[in-house]
Amino acid sequence: MASRKILLNGKRVAAEYQAIGSGDSETSEALLYWLRERFGQQGPRFGCGVSQCGACTVLLDDVPIRSCTRQLHTVDDNAEIRTLDGLSGKRPHPLQREFVELQAGQCAFCANGMIMGSLGWIEGRITAGNHEVPSEAEIEDFLSGATPNGQGNYICRCGTHTRIVAAIRSAAKEMVR
Amino acid sequence: MSVQTSRRQFLVGSGALAIGFTLAGPATSAAAAAAASNGLVRVEAVGAPANTTQSWLVLTKKGITVYSGKVELGTGVQTALAQMVVEELRLGVADVDWVQGDTLLSVSQGGTTGSKSIQNGGIQLQQAAATAFQELSHRAAAHFKVTPDQLVAQDGRFSLATRSGHSSGHTVTYKDLLKSGVTVLPLDQTVPLMAANKYVVVGTNVPRVDLPAKMDATFRFLHDVTVPGMLHGRVVRPTGRNSTQPVISNLDRAKAIEGFVDVVQHDRFIGVVATSEWAASVAASPKSGISVSWTTGPKMIAQADLPAAVRDPANHYRSVVEIDDGVAPILATADQVLNSQYFSPFHMHGGMGASTAVADVRRAPDPATGIQATIWSGTQNVTALAGAIAPLLGLAPAAVRVIYVEASGCYGHNGADDCAADAAVLSQAVGKPVRVQWTRQDEHAWEPLGGAQAHDMQGAVGPDGIIAWSHLNYAPTANSRPVDGTPGTLLAGTLMGKLPAPLPSSSVDSSGRNAPVTYDFPQRVEARLLKSFVTTGPTSAAPASPLTYLIPRTTALRSLGGFSNSFANESFFDELAHAGGHDPLELRIASLPDPRAVAVCEALRDVWRTRPPGGDGTGAGVAFHQYEVVNAYVATYAEVRVDPDTGKVTVTRVVVAHDCGLIVNPDGLRNQIEGNVVQGVGRTLKEEVFYTDDRVTSVAWQTSSFNPGPQYEVLRFNEVPAIETILINHTDKPPLGAGEPAIGTIGGAIGNAIFAAIGKRIRTLPFTPDRVKAALTG
């Protein structure tokens, strides 16, 4: 069985993964299942399995990706993966804190996607030299998959949208400082 | 499995409300879990057998455990219920442990449905807490050698009251009082509840107890439940709803997959079990694992034919006149009579997480408890699910333990119960615990749906308002919840040849919810009940064998018929108001006899009077209903912008005025109302299940190369309106549920706003760009 070693939330880890076929016809275990079953990660969640809802979002080398359709054989050894499970330091990340502060959750099954997706998006803006706090409309467009180079739509089914946008904007004010 | 325990401030007070989840897992055997419910003060059900393991409330020296039959579905009700319990115990804001929805441990409170968790469940838990509090006060009275009325209780302590009613400084803690012995009490309905004007916790914005853990991934959702030796299952569904005679091939290919365990077949139920979820998915895929060919069965009524078919008497099993105030003579002679037909399509719950369950069905019962099957499920009703699964497995009901674990929000009866049955059948077949997580395609194609409905409205209006009203409601009933003793109410049961329960005899609490209006004019309401499947005769409600579906399976979706009925009612009210030259909001106010109904409408007056003038592509509308005719009152104002070129409707602003009696947690209530608005806007503008005469074809969230054709689109972040809520609190009235009253007003408010914006009445949901464009050009 093939294996993969990655940097998971700053720690070096390795595990085997299942695959069938080879070359162009190779199919391998989804990164989502691998992170959950082998490393007990509960942040990334199975929502749709077809990259349409965002619940499985993790950061792969700082870029938000949909782990439900990302197959292990396409992830490089030594890739850096960040999950919601590893986001808190000694204190909650501003995004986590503001989601709680503004009660931006009902069932909150989707929250992983909004937190990890906007984390990668805002950090990416900062890395590119953009220290502006994103506007509400920019956040809404990002979460709707309407941003150029965005990562697709994020679904919240409970209807907590306005609080989620407010929480991200509030956290972004601190993140850009 | 980890048991999350929170920092405990039990009996000390002054902390933040926190809840320790004492989720009974395999690490805790059923016998140990039952033993743990023995306490120093324990409240159990009236008439419970002496050896019952079920409790309402248990106080020990370590803490207080609430055993709630009502479960947290992601609405925040756990926080609100805990507020009610700690209030009744005079604990201040304190921690409690929480066991919810466990057939072994909690007293059944029926389903967690219909926005009744606070309204009914909360009152029961309050009564349990009051029962325990009375016992504590008796103990405190004995301690001080006084009568209970000479005591004051606060923050987990009793004090001797001074003449002015204040604490004298002599105190005894609940913890000390608990040491004096063991008392088991039946819940006492006669113990008076605390007066609402004494509340210090109820009515405040206590933050949700579950959200911190949900935001740092330490919360254990159902989807995170694992048990030792657990395998993973996938069910291979028929290609069509009535397909028959499956033939399995490529079994060798599946067997060669590393981790493959077995293929299970019972009639039309086919599942694959493997050691990992990925291996199960590969083994169940026709591309890499088994292939199953099916014989196409009898046709269902196709989607395009439904608006006509739903009105065809040949498809009805029953017709029920629910109200008739004698409107026929008025309608026959009135000067101005309007007739309109409305229609709304099938909607789905579409939970964020696909339905999931873990089942551990043993070869023999546990000698201590008699339990042979343990099932972890996100069901709304552990008791009914256990009762339906038991005969499917050939077990006695007492041998099945169902434990609720929170899944993603469900908004009604979704695939949770069916998935639990899938896991149970597979676990029994392989003799090991099996986890089943549906695919998104399973969920979208097979979850039981909210039913389509059609409405023939007739009304008469004059200078003084509406003078007669008739609503003929055509709809399937909500009929797919698990029923005790009827395994055919579960999807796996029907695939295994079991028949579902007979269809309901009326539309009450089903597609008829909110079909009547609460205005003061005479009305007639009649329900024509559509057969969901072929029955044993023209007027029979009993399924014919073999089961042949005529439409997709229908069930309870947030507000049930309330969404479509109030869309039709409130749109038609608007039609009559305009036809009679009346202001739509003022006519509602004038037509409502109940002052609380009037009050929510009046709360919208300011915004209504400053609304956009309409006619230029922007406009505003209002709608009102009283949930289930007797519960919470909601009036909603919506503003829209209609793009004249594309027909795209944007809802820009929604204001909801809401009266659900006593408000337990204002911010939690606002969160629920906001959710109702967003989901309501989505159902009004976008959501629609697509299906053929054979199968559901909207099996994902959006169209893609894998899933061409229209899919089940829900509202996106950049389509959400600004939402304002106006809460009317009545501390002197009972609390009413708030999980679904508001959604029913959304379709009507938006439809009325579109009429104001473009002068066209659109009577079919959803208001898609194509439909609006057709109205604009038509």
Image (cartoon, rainbow, N blue to C red):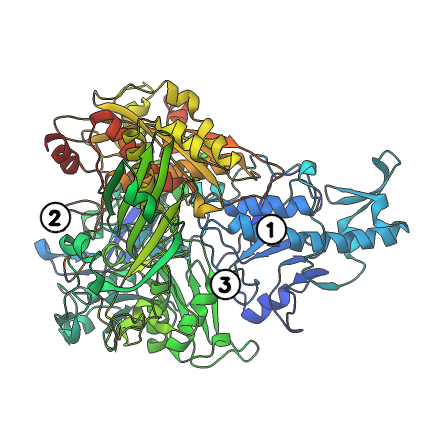
In the image, are marks 3 and 1 on the same chain? Answer: yes
Which mark is on residue B709? 2
- Is residue A10 shown to the viewer in this render? no
- Report the amino acid beneath label 3: Gly
- Secondary element under disc 2, as helix, strand or loop, is loop
Mark 3 Cα within 10 Å, few/some/many (few <14, many 20+)? some
Q: Nearer the viewer, mark 3 or mark 1?
A: 1
Residue B556 at x, y percent in the picture: 36, 55
Which mark is on residue B123? 1
Q: Nearer the viewer, mark 2 or mark 3?
A: 2
| Mark found first going from the N terminus, 3 or 1 | 3
Q: Which residue does the image show at 47% across and 35% down from the upper left? A: B658
Q: Which residue occupies the foreground of this view, B398 or B3? A: B398
Q: Do labels 3 and 1 touch, CB within 8 Å?
A: no
For mark 3, what is the residue?
Answer: B25
Separation of residues labelled 3 and 1 (CA atoms): 29 Å
Q: Which residue occupies the foreground of this view, B76 or B220? A: B76
Separation of residues labelled 1 and 2 (CA atoms): 48 Å
- Report the amino acid beneath label 2: Gly
| Mark found first going from the N terminus, 2 or 3 | 3
